[in-house]
Amino acid sequence: MTPQSDEDEVWRQIVASFNDTVEHDPADQPWPDSENVPAEPTRRVVKPSEEPEPGEDPYKDPYQDSADDENEEEEEGHFEPPPPPPLPKLDLPTKLAWVALFGGPAYLLVAAMASWHMEGWALFTAVAAFIGGFVALVVRMGDGPPNDSGWDDGAVL
């Protein structure tokens, strides 16, 4: 017999038994012991019967000593992050590009909200400042790795 004829025979058996009923019901099979999970014990919550005194924290555990609370706070260290590094210093062309990028649309927005009459040259200057600032920032970005990266610059995206 060839491997092709074996596959054909297996497919004929599958197709012939497609509408047959199941011989055994899966619900009749016993649950495997390895799947059993032990039941968790019930937990009791004991509520204090006394009302808290005025000025006392109503959520404080009445069974906990205040000295233990203070020791816990001392033992638990609080993370204080290091101060952030200073922002990089910008050169004059970069500062001017940022001012143009935000200044052009800001002028147009203020002029529109205040109902100022805008001359054609002012409108052109605001739009040109926005476009020029954007282009200047993109051109100054550069597409290479930083100069101080050393011999192993890692992944360069």
Image (cartoon, rainbow, N blue to C red):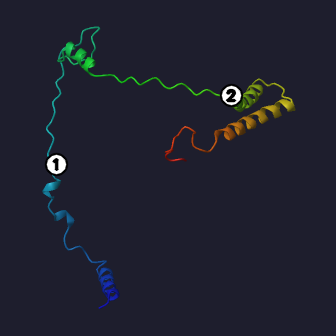
Q: Splitting the image into 4 quarters, where does residue 51 fall?
A: top left
Q: Residue 108: percent from the left, percent from the top? A: 76, 30
The x and y percentages for residue 90 are 64, 28
Image vertical order of residue 30 relative to residue 52, above or below? below
Dot 1 amino acid type: Val
Task: From this view, report whether residue 7 is shown above or below residue 110.
Answer: below
Image location of residue 21, percent across then percent down: 25, 75
Look at 14% across and 44% down and name the residue there: 39
Of the pair 58 and 11, the residue shown nearer to us: 11
Left or right of residue 43, residue 12 in this image: right
Q: CA distance from mark 1 to mark 2?
A: 66 Å
**Badge 2 amino acid:** Lys
Helix, strand or loop at mark 2: helix
Residue tagged by mark 2? 95
Query: Residue at the location (16% across, 24% down)?
Result: 46
At 68% across and 28% down in the image, what residue appears? 95
Quadrant location of residue 35? bottom left
Do labels 1 and 2 touch, CB within 8 Å? no
| Residue 60 as seen in the image, left or right of residue 82 | left
Q: Is residue 59 visible?
A: no
Residue closest to the eye, 4 or 142: 142
Residue with the most extreme top position: 54
Q: Residues within 10 Å of mark 2 (few under 14, many from 20)?
A: some
Name the one closer to the observer, 75 or 147: 147
134, above or below 8, in the image: above
Secondary structure of residue under mark 1? loop
State which tag comes first along the sequence, 1 or 2: 1
Left or right: 54 as drawn, with respect to 62: right
Looking at the rendering, in which quadrant would you find the N terminus? bottom left
Q: Which mark is residue 37?
A: 1
Residue 146 in picture, x, y percent from top left: 57, 40
